[in-house]
Image (spheres, rainbow, N blue to C red):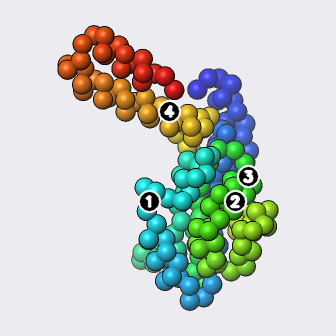
Amino acid sequence: MGLRDTLKLVTQLDPNKYGSAYGLTSLIPILPGHEDALEAHLASLDPLDSPLKRLPQLHFSRLHVIRDLVYQGPPQVPESLDQSYLIFTTSHDGELEPLLRDLAVQVREEADAIFGHCVGFPGTADPAAFAAWVTTHRKDNGYLLTPWPFKKVQEVQEALRVQTGFGELVENERNMSDAELQAAFRALMRP
């Protein structure tokens, strides 16, 4: 990271941004009696084949149900929630509204199945209404950290591809001629 990028970070005032990354934290009220069904649906999603991976700007996301606060003993003061909430968090490239609109369009059925358990869910047929609804439940992060504040998802994926490929080359180099190794390295470095 150069001086220019460092200055951008130091002068950044939005507690939900870090470099070109944006972090969403939202607490969305769940319809009474829907907690079990929503938890079961979230548990049924394959973490390695999440429908959210269709969003090219998404670094990661998390969805989980919180029913109440955990009391851990003194000096903590016991507190409870009036209702259960769906916690929806993301770290993604760019601004919030385009991500939420893309979620409504590219992950429509799955988004309806998840957020349909929540109070006031407008559906995903109107992406702008969906984006506005999620935004009303947004909470400021206070601060956001990401290991790649100026790298897009695709750049990170490419770096990981090259790293993995290079590791495989190192493991297999003893079984390769110089020409084979050179050809494999060139192929690896081609995007």
For the residues labelled 3 and 4, the Cα–Cα distance comes to 23 Å
Residue 138 shows up from this direction:
no
Q: Secondary structure at mark 2?
A: helix
Q: Determine whether, in the image, residue 30 is placed left or right of residue 160.
A: right
Circle nearer the N terminus (4, 1): 1
Would you place residue 15 above or below residue 76 in this image?
above
- Label 4 and label 1: CA atoms lie apart by 21 Å
Q: Is residue 175 left or right of residue 158?
A: left
Q: Earlier in the sequence, mark 3 or mark 4?
A: 3
Judging by the rendered image, the residue that carries numbered circle 2 is 105
Q: Which residue is mark 3?
A: 98
In the rendered structure, which disc, 2 or 3, sits on the residue that comes first in sequence?
3
Could you say which disc has been placed on residue 158 in the image?
4
Q: Secondary structure at mark 3?
A: helix
Residue shown at 78%/66% (left/top)? Answer: 126
Tell me, yes or no, whether the two marked residues, 3 and 1, touch with CB atoms within 8 Å.
no
Residue 157 screen position, x and y as percent? 50, 37
Label 4 element class:
helix
Residue type, mark 1 in image:
Pro
Q: How many C-alpha atoms fall within 10 Å of the one at disc 1: few (<14), some, or many (≥20)?
A: few
Q: Which residue is mark 1?
A: 47
Q: From where the camera sits, is residue 62 visible?
A: yes
Q: Are marks 1 and 2 in contact (CB under 8 Å)?
A: no
Cα separation, mark 2 vs mark 4, equals 26 Å
Residue 162 placement (x, y as % from top left): 43, 29
Q: Amino acid at mark 2?
A: Val
Amino acid residing under circle 4: Glu
- Foreground of the two, 146 or 58: 58
